[in-house]
Every structure is written in C-alpha cells, then in structure tokens.
Amino acid sequence: MEDRKFETLAIHAGAEIDPATKAVTSPIYPSTTFEREADGSYPQGYSYTRSGNPNRAALEHCLSTLEGGAAAAAFSSGSAAAASIFRALSPGDHVLAPDDMYHGIVKMLTEVFIPWGLKPSFVDFSDLANVRANLRHNTKLIWLETPSNPLLKITDIEAVAELARSAGALLACDNTWTPPALQPVFALGADLIMHASTKYLAGHSDVLGGVVLSRRDDEFFARIRNLQVLEGAVPSPFDCWLTLRGIKTLPYRMRAHCEHAALVAEFLSEHPRVARVYYPGLASHPGHELAAKQMRRFGGMLSFTVTGGQEEAMALAARVKLFTRATSLGGVESLIEHRASIEGPDSKTPQNLLRLSVGLEHPDDLIADLRQALDGL
Ligand SMILES: *Cc1c(COP(=O)(O)O)cnc(C)c1O
C-alpha cells in the first residue's frame, strides 16, 4: 500500500470495506464504549472512545501514511494539536518560533504557556543567522511555519532542521498551509508536523480538527499520545469521518487551489491599485527560489497590500461579490480577510493588507471579481 501514489493513498489509506455489512464507505461509530470479552480482553483494541475510536484510528492511519510519518494523534482542533506539542515539553524549556506565524499560536504561547513555564522567543526566520543566534542551552523545540502567515515569508526547512539537530532540539512544522504532498517536511528533517485539518485537509469549511504527526514513534510522541487520551481534546467520530471524506479529494483540490492562486497573484501583481503581492510562486518574491526547491507547488494562500491604508483595504473587501469576507482558509469557497483587525491591536500585520484563500471557483470569475473591486476603488 505505502508505495502507491499519493492520489491513490488519499482515497484508500484508512478506508476499508466494512467486514460486517460490506459497506464501501466506512460506518460512523458514535459508541462511547466497547464490550469486553468474557475473559476481560478487548479483541479489537477499543475500550472507551476517548482512548481510541475506529473513525479516529482510520484518520490517524491515513494522515501518517500521506505524510510518511510513523505515528499520528488527531485532536478536536488545530490549536489543541499544537498545545499538545508544547505541553509535551517541560516548564523551563525554550521554544524558538518565527516572528510571522499564525497569531492564535503566538497568543497561546504567550498567554497560556509562558505562565505554564515555557520560554518562547520570536525571531525573523527568513535570516538563518537570527535562528542560530537565538538558540540557547535549553532550546528544546523550534516551531516553524513556512510559508508564514500572513506575510508568506519562506524559511529554509532543511537548514533549520540541521540547526535544531545541532542544538538537540526538535523541529515542529505547522504545515496547515501546505497539506501532505505540497511540502514533504519529514524528508527535509522535521521531527513533528501539526496540521489544522479544519483547513485544506477537511477542505469544506464544515469541521474543526487538528493532528500531530511524528517522524518517529518515540518517547516524545508517547507523551503527545498520553496528553491526547488523558486530556481528551479528541475529535468526534463524525468529525473524523468528515475529515477523511475531505482527504479523498485533497490531491485534486490542491492542484486547483495552487493553480488558481498563481493566476490571481499574477493578475494582482499587475494592477495599479496593488502595492505588493506576497506569493512565493511569483519570481519577484524574495523566497521564490527556496520555495521552488522545498515546495512541490506554491500553495493556495496569498496576501497583498492595496495602495493606501486600512480604509482602502476595507473598501476593497467591501466591494468584492464572489469572495466571502471571512476568516479561515482551505475551503472550496474563496475568502478575503483583513488580517490586522482580526489579529487585534498588537498585530504587526500591515493595515493595508488583505489575505486571500483562493478557492475552487473558476479563476476567471475570481479575477473578474477582484478587477471590478479594484477598478472601483
Ligand atoms: C487555523 C490554523 C490553526 C489553528 O487551527 P484551529 O483548528 O482553528 O484550532 C493553526 N495554524 C494555522 C496556520 C492555521 O491556519
């Protein structure tokens, strides 16, 4: 099975014909509890759904197959998945993280994990000298997000993995923007991958979830598994089932997301009301060459600044008719978002920046919508 192609694995990994009914699509197992044999054993390995559930096991198996990991733990949100990695560290440990990354995890590190005892610091990862200079004797984890959110900075994953190894730290990548096959970070030396499966993996803006994948089934992953089971931030069987259903079309959705984003980026980069486009697929992007080396495609997310300030950005977002003004990303529908106002008053994101999650509508329609909105500014 494992040597089959990605498109085939996305459909078949974790999807078995139900032996009891021969149902082609797997049943959903809402049961919270499972019967013991007369001798006290659990022949299928399931006893209580917080500890393990067939739908969750199928999702975890599918994701570790797709990423080429040794183990996976699914959570009720991307945030819960990220938290399990931080909590598997020890109070006093230093975490090195990028200065541009998903703001919810910055808030989590600052508001939850500093009081808990972690020592995070945030530096610009696009210059590796910053990463090297900020490693400490107690650095236990490097957290990486590339392309970063929302500025799409590109970091050299292989080089950071090497720095992590030399410091005796683990490298964890938030790969939410680059679902399996887009950026094979385990092959580049990462130890852990976190996905908000809420986004591209589930793919339809209708289920919240997260996963941690580990390159090795080791002692550190055992701590994450233990936190998953003891703290119980697990996804429901239906959430797992929905996410697995989404994954079946992931390879084809991602092709179109990436193709459409490239066309939209090109259009925007030529419009006089656009100041700057942040998309690693553009040759003008400072991280373009590096992105071309470590990404198979350039992704479906991009940001751009409009000429002017917050007022012009909000006016543009108000004028679009096909893009939906909403946060989140990775669904079939295109979204437009003013990031600075959702990130709050301490956001460093430019006030004239809008972020696009480019969806699966026809790219001509997406571009026409942006054109009428920009032309009317
Ligand atoms: C959405 C997101 C998260 C958090 O996931 P939730 O499911 O909302 O908790 C983490 N990282 C990135 C990059 C995200 O886009």
Image (cartoon, grey):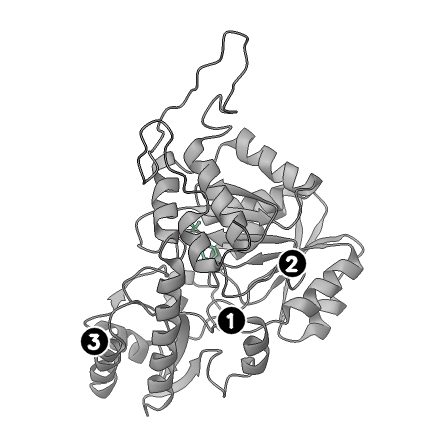
**What mark, if any, has residue 296 been given in the picture?**
1
The vertical placement of 162 against 129, above or below, is above
Residue displayed at 50% across by 42% down: 60
Decide which of 16, 213 is in the foreground and name it.
16
Q: CA distance from mark 3 to mark 1?
A: 34 Å
Mark toward the viewer: 2 or 1: 1
**What mark, if any, has residue 316 been given in the picture?**
none
Q: Image quadrant of residue 127?
A: bottom right
Do callouts 2 and 1 mark residues in contact (Cβ within 8 Å)? no
The vertical placement of 39 against 162, above or below, is above
| Residue 103, x across and y down, in percent | 48, 59
Q: Is mark 1 within 8 Å of ligand 1?
A: no
N-term-proximal mark, 3 vs 1: 1
Q: Is residue 276 left or right of residue 118?
A: left
Looking at the picture, which amino acid does disc 2 mark? Ala
Mark toward the viewer: 3 or 1: 1
Q: Is residue 179 left or right of residue 157?
A: left
Looking at the picture, which amino acid does disc 1 mark? Arg
| Residue 337, x across and y down, in percent | 33, 67
Name the residue beneath numbered marker 2: 190
The vertical placement of 26 against 154, above or below, is above
Looking at the picture, which amino acid does disc 3 mark? Arg
**What mark, if any, has residue 319 been given in the picture?**
3
Q: Is residue 344 visible?
A: no
Decide which of 246, 377 is in the foreground and name it.
246
Q: Is residue 10 left or right of residue 217?
A: left
Q: Is mark 3 within 8 Å of ligand 1?
A: no
Residue displayed at 35% across by 28% down: 30
